[in-house]
Amino acid sequence: MRGAFCWAILLPCATVATAAPRTLGFVITTWNIAAYETRFADECPLGLNPGYDELWWRGLSKPDRAKFTDNGLKSRLERYFVAIRRGPNGEDVCMNPTSVKDPPLMLVEGEKSYGMDLDGKDGVATGKSCPHQEFTGLDGTPGVDNQLYRLLGCVYGFRSYGQFEANENENRKSNGKGMTLIEVTGVDDVRNDPDVRVTIYRAVDQYTLDGSGRFLPYGSYRIDVADGKPRYSSTLRGKIVDGVLTTEPGDVNLPFYGNYTYMNRFLRDLRFRIKLADDAASAEGMAAGYLGVDQLMFYVGGLGPIQSSAPANCPSIHVAAYEVADGHPDPKTGRCTTLSSAYNFKAVAAFIVHGESQRYADGWFDRVRRFISDLRASN
Amino acid sequence: MHRGFASLLLSLSLLVLAACGGRAPKTSGAEPGARLLTEPQYRSIIADVFGLQITIGGTFDPLVRTNGLLTVGASLARVTPAGFEQFDRMARSIAAQVTDPAHRDYLIGCAPQDVARPDDRCAEQFLGRVGRFLFRRPLEREELATRVAEARRAAVELGGFYDGLAASLGGMLVSPSFLFVIDVVEPDPDARGSMRLDAYSKASRLSFFLWGTAPDEELLRAAAQGELHDRRGLERQAERLLAAPRMEAGLRAFFDDMMAFEDIARIEKDSIIYPAFSAAVASDAREQTLRTIMRVVLEENGDYRDIFTTRKTYVSGALGRIYHVPVDRPDGGWTPYEFPEHDPRAGIVTHVSFTALHSHAGRSSPTLRGRALRELLLCQKVPDPPGNVDFSKFNDPHSPARTARERLSVHALQPACAGCHKITDPVGLGMEHIDGAGQLRTAESGVAIDARGSLDGIEFADVGGIGPAMHDNPAAPACLVDRMYAYATARPTQRNERKYVKYLEREFARDDYRVPALLHKIAISDALYAVRPPVEPSPAFARNTP
């Protein structure tokens, strides 16, 4: 009977050994910085960092506090646009993080972290990395590189009870931008396969949710296409062992949207470790690679008023980011330009739609361009 | 959908020629009657006469499904006071929309001299034109004069021409001449002592059968000129209707009725158990099956029985999540899809529109599915369960029985239940690989499902075997013929028509089970228009009637 149930590309079917390789599709539903947090923030022995508002407040005289806050009645959100412009010439310190000299960022000092060993070294400098302290994985794995966590782990807004991470996921859920598709091709056996390909795409269709807002598996998603080619299509080699898919490292363009910022997130030496559910209807895993400091600061600089409820301070983060950066030294300055990082994610099974139907998935500009092109051709 | 119509007509003509050898048994039909418009017919007529932009609010009284069809139930329906209130409300709303400033310029077709005063000329022009389509016949001179007088009186009382016109139009829309399709008979000049339907009644019967709506301008013209009493004239009109794109809507209306799809609007599923099921799924499920049937029987002019085995269908984004198949247009629209050979799903009986509709809110139901299959698609009667049936063992949440088969095996031990379950369950249990929402599954409550089943002596291993069993079951095409003829006449089939229906079944088989050929045969038949003279009341009845 099992043989009769190999109908779907997503379902395992061990009895059909000679079947053509199949394709697994997933849409990522949640994506978070892999941050190890203890109950009492022991990893941050000096406490959590002050945000932009606290630093602005500290710098004000008593009369100015009264003046700028309507005698203390203005909320953090209402005074954001004054507080953030505390540069010497009224600069927005998130857009111009070097315009002020703020207290140094308090970093994570704990020994444990989620993540992977990205450099294969013990944190010593190589041609490809800068000296840095490494973590021990929660399972005791040594040499875990996760400098993004070291940088942001003690920033309130980036912790699990801060708002940035939750808001990012909610943004993607509500408007469907920056949704990431994972396609695994060449799968002969979803439990064990020594050679598969993992390709990352961006979806143009919204999440499929049930009436309660929960993610539904088996939705169809068209990929983002420009000029007939996928806008995102980074591919990694991988293998599946006992239902766990791991990939070799490679440079990957990840579509990203969160906290009202859309960006192409370029992660270098990114690798995945994905645990597939037995029925392949869902998956969860970790991605780890190097994130450019410039990319991080582009995102942090655009956080805007959300910081009023999720404290962070851009200038302190900016300075510290370069201090803890551990990857891809600049050939001229020798200063590292990327941060080792790790992300936890969850996904549900999805159908990734390619082919002729992609004409519908073109963006608005593509459609207008095609319309004009057709019009010219017809004349 | 209609690229094959030219060749279809040609083949129809050939089929007609080929069929000339067999003589159709004579029928005497039924007494002339009156049938309440069904909801789809009402909506179609309003859309045809006034356009789709006129919205129809309110609810229609439910009809009693009779001989498997609501259309037949309409021949036995009466308008209740509450039902009339709804018709009146709808009529007022439609009339108000037709005469409002947004629509009046292009729907009324004339303008009064003074909008604050009555205008008999414009009222007569509008009411005469519209009334002919609504009543499916020209209005008598006195009848039209009465409607115009109503418009005049209301215009004076309400202070405006359009208000008066709306009042009169509203009156027409609650008139029995609109709400009921009335058989009008006249002496048959070709058979002394016999009656026949008058030309307009013939036009209505033909149009409601093939298009599911009232006659159009050309059919009314043909009726006015007596062409429908002439065989060639009738054939010309029938073939025109069959070749028109509108034919698809008429055929959809028939299958919608036959499949009892009106219940889909009321379908509810437990969102915890079936999170992927939604109102969109239910609505799309109906459309999916109708599209699938139309492709087989109309677009491809194929064998009707193939609807039970075809792997080709259409899926929407919502259905894709239930069937676990990809769709090209997740944001709307339909994607042609063909279930692969190794997929057990094939044919309309495996569609969500059947499996989910005939299930409970939180679980499948072999009994409901078996019953629906037998009653709707094989025209077999399954008795209702006895009033004192004990479901406690079946519904016991602590029962060790984990699958429907195990639960039913306990339940069906009750002697009062066993008889009917023997009719429904063997085929219904064969569909257990599809859950109550229409999704494939292999296990229930962690136990592998035994989905063996049987239908009238044909045994199969799982749901994949139901399609072929239905395809080869002689009751399936016979059922279609039975339903189609009853739908055409819109009344229960009479005893004197049984031989004719048997004849149609044979002809259907001879025509390789092509539905358009069957439609054509019925549309030009004498049987469709045959009427018996009404039975005179007995003298005793007449004496006692005030």
Image: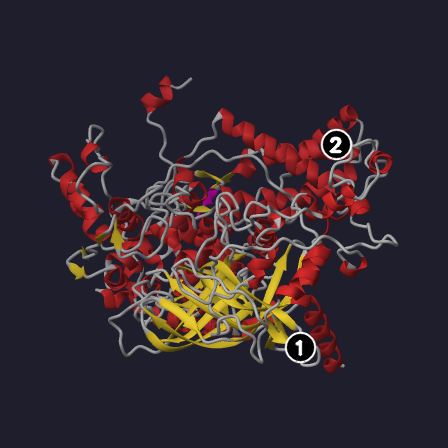
What is the basis of the colouring in this image?
Answer: secondary structure
Q: Chain of mark 1?
A: A
Q: Is residue B109 above or below residue A332?
A: above
Residue type, mark 2 in image: Asp
Instruction: Pick whichever, B34 or B537, lies toward us.
Output: B34
Q: Is residue B299 left or right of residue A296?
A: left
Residue type, mark 1 in image: Gly
Q: Is residue B113 above or below residue A231?
A: above
Give the total of numbered labels.
2
Q: Dividing the picture into quarters, in which one does residue B408 lie?
A: top left
Q: Position of residue B262 (x, y in %)?
A: 43, 44
Residue to which mark 2 is pinned: B163
The residues bearing labels 1 and 2 have C-alpha atoms spaced at a distance of 86 Å
Instruction: Farthest residue to the right: give it.
Output: A89
What span is colored magenta in the figure? Answer: B183-189
Q: Position of residue B113 (x, y in %)?
A: 86, 39
Q: Are marks 1 and 2 on the same chain?
A: no
Q: Are marks 1 and 2 in contact (CB under 8 Å)?
A: no
Q: Is residue B39 left or right of residue A312?
A: left
Instruction: Pick whichever, B243 or A222, lies toward us.
Output: A222
The quadrant the N terminus of chain A occupies is bottom left
Residue B327 shows in the view: no
Residue A322 shows in the view: yes
Residue A367 lies in magenta, yes or no? no
Label 1 neighbour load within 10 Å: few <14, some 14-19, many 20+: few
Instruction: Pick whichever, A31 or A182, lies toward us.
Output: A31
Label 2 neighbour load within 10 Å: few <14, some 14-19, many 20+: many
Residue to which mark 1 is pinned: A334
Q: Secondary structure at mark 2?
A: helix
Q: Position of residue B206 (x, y in %)?
A: 48, 53
